Image (cartoon, rainbow, N blue to C red):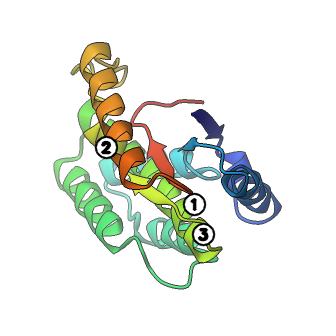
Amino acid sequence: MKILKFGGKSLANGEGLQKVVQTIAQKYFNNEPIAVVVSARGNATDELVILLKKAQANINFQADFEQFKKYQLEGLKENIFEEEFSVLQKLLEGVSLLGDYSEKIKDQVIAYGEILSAKYVANVLNENSIKAQFTDSRQLIKTDTNFGNAQPIDTVSKRNVLDYFEKNLNTYPSHHLDHLYFLLDVS
């Protein structure tokens, strides 16, 4: 199995995203077993940090959040991120009320860049008749509690990933594609 990793700039809307889809499609239609790992699209990580800092400073972040959501939804036929946007809204509101946030909350907010990206790419692929399954790697990759610089717990994570692919590759023996995203910055 090959692991394809795409960074944020290549996943930005437009030509870059089309090249990513073409690359994946070529491997898919050649029946190559692949898994895809994606970073947050465009400037999503930086934008989420700005939203977090505005919320901490009790500066109205809602207009910026709406712009963030608009960009994340660009090109989609429907809002596939209602749950994610709702959680982000609640996290930002909580930070605004407290006027502070922990490294754990920061990691949680920033992780949504990868979550949205993985769901977005999987959705675009499915719309292009490429069977893609979004996989939440938080269920697979377990880390220590050193928030802000968490490290994977190798033995547990490796077993989870191997078990996952063994189960799912047997379920979908041909034309199966999984999308993973990571809580850590994989760039």
To which quarter of the image does residue 6 belong?
A: top right
Q: Regarding mark 3 in the picture, which secondary structure is present there?
A: helix
Q: Regarding mark 1 in the picture, which secondary structure is present there?
A: helix
Question: In this figure, which residue is indicated by the disc labeled 2?
Answer: 167
> In the image, what residue type sits under mark 2?
Lys
- Compared across the picture, whether 99 is left or right of 74 comes to left
> As rendered, which of 182 and 156 lies closer to the eye?
156
> As rendered, which of 47 and 177 lies closer to the eye?
177
Mark 1 against mark 2, which lies toward the viewer? Answer: 2
Q: Is residue 82 visible?
A: yes
The percent coordinates of residue 69 (x first, y second) are: 49, 70
> In the image, what residue type sits under mark 3?
Val
In this view, which residue lies farthest toward the bottom? 77
> Considering only vertical position in the picture, is 154 above or below 28?
above
The percent coordinates of residue 124 (x first, y second) are: 60, 69
Q: Regarding mark 2 in the picture, which secondary structure is present there?
A: helix
> As rendered, which of 181 and 114 lies closer to the eye?
181
How many labels were placed on the picture? Answer: 3
Q: Residue at x 66, y 54 (%)?
A: 28
Q: Quadrant of the C terminus?
A: top right
Are circles 1 and 3 on residues that touch, CB within 8 Å? yes
Q: Earlier in the sequence, mark 1 or mark 2?
A: 1
The mark found on residue 121 in the picture is 1
Q: Residue at x 29, y 33 (%)?
A: 163
To which quarter of the image does residue 156 belong?
A: top left
Are circles 2 and 3 on residues that touch, CB within 8 Å? no
Structural crowding at the residue carrying mark 3, measured as other residues with C-alpha within 10 Å and reported as few (<14), some (14–19) or many (≥20): some
- Compared across the picture, whether 156 is left or right of 47 comes to left
Question: In this figure, which residue is indicated by the disc labeled 3?
Answer: 124
